[in-house]
Image: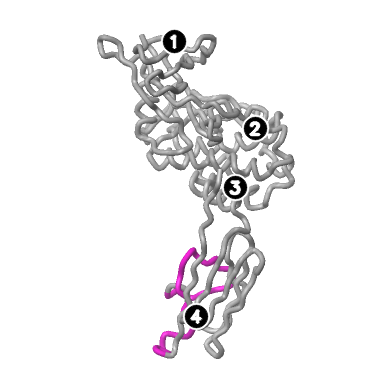
């Protein structure tokens, strides 16, 4: 079945619910890869489905597809995909409480994979601990796209999914598949990464039908509050109340670079005010035109107080506002015309290092 360039590595065959995966050696490129095929050719539609979705996805957190194997009649027999040789996450919970940074980094990578998929219109449908693993380079990657869908109007017939990870609405007959179902599974992953035991409310069928699950904070008290709220909202029984994957990814990414940002205010060519972890607040004062105080909390640059008429990108600046990465602050009412003064603000965007 396999072309001569691929040599099966003995003793590495694994059987799943429908598919079979075998570790093989690509002699042409001299690397270990995975050959995935269906145990029953009648289920080849799953393989083709996975092929379509992997080929259209561009994400460093989704397993790569390398080759497609056909028989002599041109029928697809299997696919060659990246072999993930790094760690799995089945026992991650043992170290989660003592390594909150690694826990946040793991959820950031899962959420980034989902965000990249959802922005391509793809719903994974079977997100769980068993379906992601690290590459040899230590990058978490999501795999097993056999039941994924890119049809926004797709309605499930068999309600296929993994118990506990399946969102409450999946228990309804003929429900439409949505990205919010992946987000619910992301919330379950957050629990599975933190504890070997799920709260009883998540084990109900349908889940949380008799009571809501407790906060993730109950088992990981060291989690930052902003991450707690987002994880808890993933498990909302109402899909509309769950965050989207990019929102989750962005927040967790910012948490990974906490205290690494730098903000700069420039007043003409005369003065520069700098905000950093070591210098957490500044007051920019332009005399009778007004003044603002801005604090850096490790994640955001937040306006604490405003004196006078001050505008941000032509909108009135109010206490509590968070400054964007770059903006222009105008001191003075529009009627002052040339007597007004402008202050530019720019902040760094530290890169998340995995």
Q: CA distance from mark 4 to mark 3?
A: 37 Å
Residue holding disc 1: 39
Describe the element under mark 4 as helix, strand or loop. Answer: strand
C-beta proximity under 8 Å, tags 4 and 1? no
Residue 235's disc number: none
Residue holding disc 2: 192
Q: CA distance from mark 4 to mark 1?
A: 68 Å
Q: CA distance from mark 3 to mark 2?
A: 16 Å
Is residue 162 highlighted in magenta?
Answer: no
Percent from the top left, x then y, of residue 102? 64, 41
- Residues packed near mark 4 inside 10 Å, few (<14), some (14 to 19) or many (20 plus): some
**Mark 4 or mark 1: which comes first in sequence?**
1
| Magenta residues, start to end | 314-338
C-beta proximity under 8 Å, tags 4 and 3? no
Is residue 334 highlighted in magenta?
Answer: yes
**Mark 4 or mark 3: which comes first in sequence?**
3
Residue 230's disc number: 3
Q: Is residue 267 above or below residue 103?
A: below
Q: Tell me which corner region of the image, top left, top right, bottom left or bottom right, holds residue 34.
A: top left
Residue 267's disc number: 4
Q: Is residue 71 above or below residue 186?
A: above
């Amino acid at each position: 079945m396999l072309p001569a360039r691929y040599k099966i590595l003995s003793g590495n065959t694994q059987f799943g619910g429908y598919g079979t995966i075998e570790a093989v050696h690509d002699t042409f490129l001299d690397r270990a890869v995975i050959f995935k095929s269906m145990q029953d050719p009648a289920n080849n539609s799953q393989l083709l489905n996975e092929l379509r979705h992997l080929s259209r996805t561009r994400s460093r957190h989704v397993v790569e597809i390398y080759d497609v194997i056909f028989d002599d009649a041109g029928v697809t027999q299997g696919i060659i995909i990246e072999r993930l040789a790094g760690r799995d996450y089945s026992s991650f919970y043992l170290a989660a409480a003592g390594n909150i940074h690694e826990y946040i980094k793991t959820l950031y990578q899962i959420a980034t994979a989902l965000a990249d998929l959802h922005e391509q219109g793809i719903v994974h449908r079977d997100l769980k601990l068993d379906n992601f693993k690290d590459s040899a380079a230590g990058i978490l990657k999501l795999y097993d796209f056999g039941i994924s869908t890119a049809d926004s109007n797709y309605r499930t017939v068999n309600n296929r999914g993994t118990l506990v990870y399946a969102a409450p609405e999946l228990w309804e007959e003929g429900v439409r598949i949505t990205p919010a179902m992946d987000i619910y599974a992301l919330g379950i992953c957050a629990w599975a990464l933190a504890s070997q035991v799920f709260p009883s409310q998540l084990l109900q069928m349908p889940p949380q039908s008799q009571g809501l699950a407790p906060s993730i904070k109950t088992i990981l008290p060291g989690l930052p509050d902003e991450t707690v709220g987002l994880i808890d909202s993933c498990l909302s029984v109402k899909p509309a109340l769950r965050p989207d994957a990019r929102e989750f990814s962005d927040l967790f990414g910012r948490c990974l670079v906490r205290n690494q940002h730098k903000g700069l205010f420039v007043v003409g060519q005369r003065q520069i005010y700098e905000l950093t972890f070591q210098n957490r607040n500044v007051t920019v004062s332009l005399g009778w035109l007004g003044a603002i105080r801005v604090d850096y909390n490790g994640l955001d640059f937040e306006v604490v107080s405003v004196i006078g008429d001050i505008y941000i990108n032509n909108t009135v600046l109010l206490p509590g506002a968070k400054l964007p990465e770059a903006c222009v602050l105008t001191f003075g009412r529009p009627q002052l015309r040339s007597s007004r003064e402008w202050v530019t603000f720019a902040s760094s965007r530290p890169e998340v290092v995995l």
